[in-house]
Amino acid sequence: MEIEIKFRVEFNKTKAAIESLGAVFVGEEIQEDLYFSLSLPELLRIRRIVNLGRAFLTYKRIEDSGKNEEFDEIEVEISDFEKMREILKRLGFEEDIWVRKRRLVYRLNDVTFELSEVERLGAFLDIEVMSDDVSYAKKRIWDISRRIGLRKEDVEPRLYQELLHELEDKT
């Protein structure tokens, strides 16, 4: 199971804090995520990692609606983003919203840091642990988050697509 907590952050300060822990830089990804209209707690997206020439189809089921920290996830690499997009449309899935971001990925043992600049939304950090032991994973995430100066007040429980829809509703 994927356990992650998302924080609103200041990009450069958080990058320096992650690096000060000794986390290993894995790489940079320019991501374009196309989400399809499904009722929560289910999510379906196609992700294109532009700078790496890779694409993925991902299904997620949120196991803790409202907090959005626990996900049952199935992901498969696909060879053609546009063809998969067309298949899903022909199957009746409606396109919902695009989420575009620049992401820096770091690892420290069993912890993954995904520091993102999300178009129209700002900077976020996802701290993730893959584990079937939810309590262990959350404890690990909170121990690490405190070491880089993050607090409960910094948590952003809403999904990126929810935040973008809220922006659209305001305009």
Image (cartoon, rainbow, N blue to C red):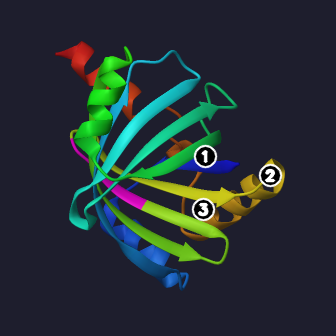
Q: Earlier in the sequence, mark 2 or mark 1?
A: 2
Residue at 56% in and 66% down: 112
Looking at the rendering, in which quadrant would you find the C terminus? top left
Picture quadrant where residue 21 is located: bottom right
Percent position of residue 85, x then y: 29, 33
Residue 23 vertical position relative to residue 7 in the rendered view, above or below:
below
Which residues fall within the magenta stretch? 115-119
Nearer the camera: disc 2 or disc 1: 2
Residue 163 can be seen, yes or no? no
Q: Residue at x 52, y 47 (%)?
A: 75
- In contact (CB < 8 Å): disc 3 and disc 1: no
Give the label on residue 152, or none.
Answer: 1
Q: Amino acid at mark 1?
A: Lys
How far apart marks 3 and 2 lie (CA) works out to: 20 Å
Q: On the rendered structure, is 128 left or right of 83?
A: right
Name the amino acid type tagged 3.
Ser
Say left or right for 121 vs 158: left
Separation of marks 3 and 1 at Cα, in angstroms: 9 Å
> Residue 27: x and y, percent?
36, 74
Query: Which element carries disc 3, helix, strand or loop?
Result: helix
- Residue that label 3 marks: 145
Task: Find residue 108 and report its horizontal and vertical position in percent.
Answer: 59, 77
Of badges 3 and 1, the one in the foreground is 3
Where does label 2 land, which residue? 132
Disc with the residue nearer the chain's start (3 vs 1) = 3
Q: CA distance from mark 2 to mark 1?
A: 23 Å
Q: Secondary structure at mark 1?
A: helix
